[in-house]
Amino acid sequence: MRNMKDRQKPLAIDLFCGCGGISTGLAAAGFEILAGVDSEPNYLSSFSHNFPHAQSLQLDLAKYSPQDFMKALQLAPGEVDLLAGGPPCQGFSKNVPRKNRYLDDPRNHLLKSFLDYCEVLLPRLILMENVAEMKNGFQQAYSEELFSRLHQAGYMVSHEVVNAADYGVPQRRRRAFFIASRDGLRLAFPKPTHTNPTSQQGLFPLPGYVTVWEAIGDLPSLKHGEGQEVCEYQSAPFSPYQRLVRNCTNRVTNHVARYLQPTQYERLDSLQPGEGLKDLPLHLQTKSGYSGAYGRLTKEMIAPTITRWVFHPGSGRWGHPIDIRTLTIREAARIQGFPDRFDFVGSFTQRAGQVGNAVPPLLAQRLAETMWHQVVSFDNSATNFSRSSWSLAIGKEKVTA
C-alpha cells in the first residue's frame, strides 16, 4: 500500500462505480482514484481497463462490512478525501409502475449500505447520485434518513435535482445529487454553464445546450452492421464539445453500428429525423411501445436520457439523425459526456449497459471541481483566520507586557 503522506492529489473512492463514470469525472477534476467497487464483473472490466492504477474490487457492499473494507485497503477513518457513489435504487425508478413501488423494497437497501460506509470511512467529502424520484419518493423517507444519519456523523448536506444539459452534457438527464462536507461547510452546487437558447437573458448569456450534432457529427458515417473497434475521425472537430472530448486523442474506439433485423431497419428507414413510433406506416406499426420507440434524433435536438437499452431501436429515440441505424457505443458515450480516450470492454449489450447506467463524467467533474474549490477556499480562510488570531494574541501580549 502506498504511503498516504506522500500523495500529491486528493484521494477518492468510487462505490457502485459501474464502468467508471464518476471516477472519470473525479480524475478530470484532479482526484486520485484509489479504488472502484461494484458487484458486476463486466462493469469492473471496463473500470479496471481505464483505471489500471486503481484497485478494482468486485464486492456486494450489502454483505461486505465497511470495517473489513478499510482493513483490506489499509485505510484509517478520515483518510479519504471524497467518497462517491451511485447506489442502485431501482425501486424508485419511474419505469417501475407506482403500484409496484413500496418503502422497504430490497432494491433500495444499497442506499443504506452506502451510508454505512460513509459513517465508518468518514471521508471529508461525500458525493452521491441517484434517480430524481429518490429525493422525494415515499414522503422523502430515504432522503430524511440520509440527512439524519449524515448529520449525526458530522456532515452538512446539500441536495439538488440537476439536469446534465445545464452543465454541457448533450443530453436531458435529471438526477438527484447529495453533496456533503465534515468541515462545517455547507457546499453550494455549481452554477449552470449552459442553458436553453430560448431562455437566454442578460448581457452575458450562457452558451446554448450542446446539440446532438455538436456531440457526434465528427464521427464516421456508418451503415448498420458496419464499423471498426478502432478507426480514424471523419473530420476535424467543428464544435467546442468535440474538442473537449477528443482532448488530443487521435483515434476513435467502440464505433460499431449494431446490425438491425429486417423489420427494424425498415421501420427506421421509413422515418425522417425527429419522427418516431406514431409516424410509422400502418404495415410497420407495433402493438405497443415506449413513446420514443423507433425515434430518430435530429441534428439540432438535445438527446433524451441515454439508458442501458440504447442498443435496441424499440426502446427509445436511438436512431441516428443521418444514417439509417442506431447509435454506436461511442456515440452514446459522447452523449453521456465520456471522453474519447475511455474504452469500453465487453459485448455490445454489456457496453450499452455500462454507458446507460453511468453518471455523466462531465457532470461529475463539474460537481467535484466546485466541491474541492470550496474546501480549499475554506481551508485558506481558516488558516488566515488562525494567523490573524495568533498575531492579535502576540500583539496583546506585547501591550500587556
Image (cartoon, helix red, strand yellow):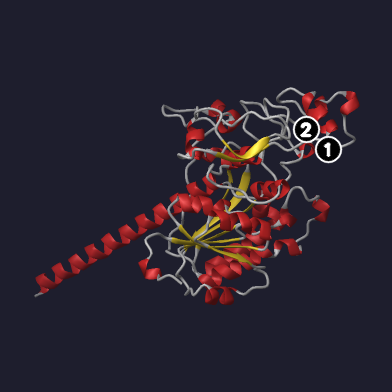
Placement of the C terminus among the 4 image quadrants = bottom left
Tell me if 101 is positioned left or right of 17 in this view: right
Query: Visible in this render: residue 129?
Result: no
Q: Read off the residue under disc 1.
A: 289
Residue that appears at 70% across and 34% down:
226
Which quadrant would residue 254 be assigned to in this image?
Answer: top right
Q: Position of residue 227 (x, y in %)?
A: 66, 35
* Nearest to viewer (mark 2 / mark 1): 2
| Residue at screen point 83% across, 26% down | 280
Question: For the residue labelled by badge 1, is the local secondary structure a helix, a strand or a loop?
Answer: loop
- Residue 120 x %, y %: 54, 73
- Which mark is on residue 248? none
Q: Is residue 143 above or below residue 167?
A: below
Q: Amino acid at mark 2?
A: Tyr
Q: Nearer the viewer, residue 328 or 140?
A: 328
- Label disc, if present, on residue 294 of the rendered structure: 2
Tell me if label 2 and label 1 are in contact, CB under 8 Å.
yes
In the image, 312: left or right of 14?
A: right
Identify the residue at image location x=53%, y=27%: 235
**Vertical position of residue 257 compared to residue 120: above or below:** above
Amino acid at pointer 1? Gly
Identify which residue, 285 or 90, lies in the foreground: 285
Residue 230 in picture, x, y percent from top left: 59, 40
Q: Is residue 73 above or below residue 361?
A: below
Q: Which SS class for mark 2?
A: loop
